[in-house]
Amino acid sequence: MIKVDNLTKSFSKDVKALDSFSLEIQKGENFALLGPNGAGKSTLLKILLGLVHPSSGKASLNNIDSQKSDSRKNVAYLPEKFDFYPYYTVEGTLKFMAKLYGVKKADIQNEITRTLQSMNIEDLKKRKMSKLSKGQLQRVGIAGTLLGDNEIYFFDEPFSGLDPIGIRDFKNLVKELKNKGKTIFINSHILSEIEVLCDSFAIINKGESLFRGTLKDLAGKKLEDFFAEKIGA
């Protein structure tokens, strides 16, 4: 479902966000890309979504070049910092997003109700986006990804701003998507949550791939200890 082949992205002569990075993720895989701040995680995600052009190499979604708009059909995305027009209400924001996702007009209101309930924010429906806390904004963003029936879900630092209840709700959401056979890609550096949430992961630092495997490959080690060893090396 997701393929990255020898991808390089240079922002200047001396700065490489990605350096010959390769990755394959299968349909139904629950995957996490781990790395410290500035490792290249968000740059990779933006290339996969066609928001940034690679300097060299290729990336594809469902066997379609990521630079082509058709690759983004049936793809949901939560950016690292979700926000929207401040004068829109939560309901209005989700209605706007539902149209972008191609939800049929007759189904939009039911979809909004379903997603609000999924993230436990029904009481925020009429509140303007400018009046929301960071955690509430994040919940709205996550709810937006649930609109319609997508096949690939990209979450960039989804735990940002969430309180413990919000984190629990998000983890339950991911489990539901996994049970439906959806492909999930999470960018994060919150290792304790990833350890109980994802089956497979890769570690990236300074644009380079340091490891690709599953939690079983840790051989009893804690993910944070394994991560520290790889980054330190």
Image (cartoon, rainbow, N blue to C red):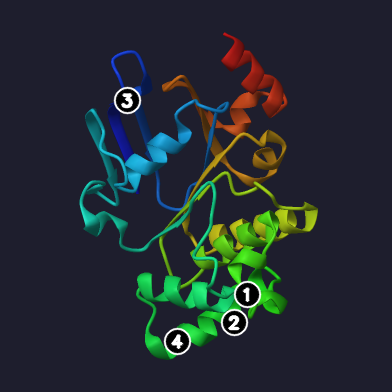
Left or right of residue 106: residue 136? right
In this view, the residue in front, 27 or 151, is: 151
Q: Which residue is mark 3?
A: 11
Residue at figure coordinates x 57%, y 8% from the top left? 233
Q: Which residue is mark 1?
A: 116
For marks 3 and 4, the one nearer the N-term is 3
In this view, the residue in front, 160 or 213, is: 160
Cα separation, mark 3 vs mark 1, equals 39 Å
Query: For residue 113, which numbered disc appears in the image?
Result: 2
Residue at figure coordinates x 60%, y 43% from the top left? 198
Left or right of residue 133: residue 140? left
Identify the secondary structure beneath mark 2. helix
Cα separation, mark 1 vs mark 2, equals 5 Å
Q: Residues within 10 Å of mark 3 (few under 14, many from 20)?
A: few
Cα separation, mark 1 vs mark 4, equals 14 Å
Q: Marks 2 and 1: in contact by CB < 8 Å? A: yes
Q: Marks 2 and 3: in contact by CB < 8 Å? A: no
